[in-house]
Amino acid sequence: MLTSAVPSSRTPPTARRQRGAVVIEMAFAFSILFALFWGIISYALPLFMQQVMNHATSETARYVIRLDPGVLTQAEITVLASTDLQRRLDVLPPSFRRPEALQQDVRWVAGSPCASLHLELAHPGCSTDNTSSCLTPAIRLLGTSIPNIGRIEAHAEVMLGAGCG
């Protein structure tokens, strides 16, 4: 029996099965790579925000130290500190600086012989009740939210007065 030298236009069954295996492998690899990418972005944003908040409060504290409490009142120093703190937070995207997303507290605590200026920044974190303050959208997986980022805080304190040292 003679066989034809002309190739058949039909795809052999083993090639069709191989294409199906490639699609399944690609779907599996893509889901792992997407989860890895999502994890990196979801946890890098809060870490970046924590760094910016720490830097802003410490640099504002350094700024306040250079002010003369003998010339300026506590109210004026508070306004200057709040303005400087807001200016240093301009690095963050506007959605991260919304008043409901980022709480700022600049207050004086009386002391003897010094008064101290407390600078605090806080981001409430993401909860199932309040998703408007989430830095990144959460994915519900096995009964938990990923990422489950808690409250992010930054603090600084400056003691001002004649007897402080």
Image (spheres, rainbow, N blue to C red):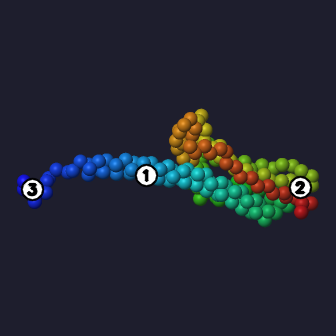
Q: Tell me the quadrant of the picture where the N terminus can be found.
A: bottom left
Q: Do the residues labelled 2 and 1 touch (CB within 8 Å)?
A: no
Residue at 37% from the left image edge and 47% from the top image edge: 24
Question: Is residue 81 rendered to the left or right of residue 44?
Answer: right
Residue at 39% from the left image edge and 50% from the top image edge: 25
Mark whose residue sits in front, 2 or 1: 1
Locate residue 55, reporting x and y percent: 69, 60
Which of 129/57 is in front?
129
Residue identifier under label 2? 114
Q: Residue 3 carries which label?
A: 3
Q: Measure the alpha-carbon separation of dots 3 and 2.
A: 103 Å
Residue identifier under label 1? 29
Residue at 79% from the left image edge and 62% from the top image edge: 65
Locate residue 72, reporting x and y percent: 80, 59
Mark whose residue sits in front, 1 or 3: 3
* Residue furthest bottom as drawn: 66
Which of 143/82 is in front?
143
Of pointers 2 and 1, the one earlier in the residue sequence: 1
Q: Residue 111 carries which label?
A: none
Q: Measure the alpha-carbon separation of dots 1 and 3.
A: 42 Å
